[in-house]
Image: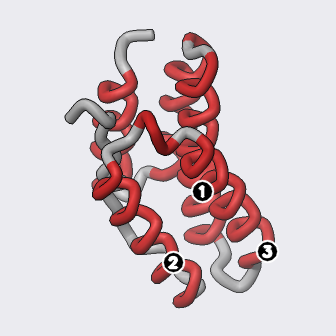
């Protein structure tokens, strides 16, 4: 795999432009080359991007979007040793606010960093 941080940076660039579906699609290229916990972590981020995309498409249908957000967060929690704790905490808090509002923001930086950064 190129690097986990490269995947995070690409997700941030697309999320900052509100392109959640594209983030989901481009992260899959990293995911296909990953193994072990990195693969699980990337799958979680892909699910979060897909959940945000679904929520933006139709905020009246939150069940599927929330399911994806929750599954994604579970995967990030399972692989938290790979992530900088403050970055993960900030993403969890942001997704909590999104869940409470039932609306995806027009754009969002995921902000994940590797544990060594």
Q: How crowded is mark 3: few (under 14 residues within 10 Å), some or many (20 or more)?
A: few
Q: Would you call the spot at circle 2 few (<14 residues within 10 Å), some (14-19), or many (20 or more)?
A: some
Q: Distance between the residues labelled 2 and 1?
A: 10 Å
Mark 1 to mark 3 CA distance (whole Å)? 15 Å
* Residue on which the image places disc 1: 73
Q: Quadrant of the N terminus?
A: top left
Q: Position of residue 40 (x, y in %)?
A: 63, 32
Q: Mark 3 points at which residue?
A: 63
8 vs 108, nearest the viewer: 8
Q: Do the residues under discs 1 and 3 have CB atoms within 8 angstroms?
A: no
Is 53 drawn above or below residue 44 in the view shown? Answer: below
Label disc, if present, on residue 43 of the rendered structure: none
**First in sequence: mark 2 vs mark 3:** 3
- Say if 39 sits above or below 91 in the image: above
Q: Which of marks 1 and 3 is nearer the N terminus?
A: 3
Circle 1: element type? helix
Tell me: residue 99, above or below residue 108: below
Answer yes or no: do the residues labelled 2 and 1 have beta carbons within 8 Å?
A: no
Image point (66%, 54%), residue name: 74
């Amino acid at each position: 795999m190129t690097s986990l941080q490269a995947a995070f940076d690409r997700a941030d660039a697309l999320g900052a432009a509100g392109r959640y579906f594209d983030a989901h699609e481009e992260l899959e290229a990293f995911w296909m080359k990953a193994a072990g916990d990195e693969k699980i972590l990337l799958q979680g981020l892909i699910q979060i991007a897909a959940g945000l995309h679904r929520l933006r498409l139709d905020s009246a249908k939150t069940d599927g979007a929330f399911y994806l957000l929750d599954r994604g967060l579970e995967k990030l929690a399972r692989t938290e040793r790979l992530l900088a704790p403050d970055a993960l905490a900030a993403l969890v808090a942001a997704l909590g606010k999104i869940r409470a509002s039932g609306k995806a923001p027009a754009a969002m930086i995921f902000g994940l960093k590797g544990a060594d950064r």
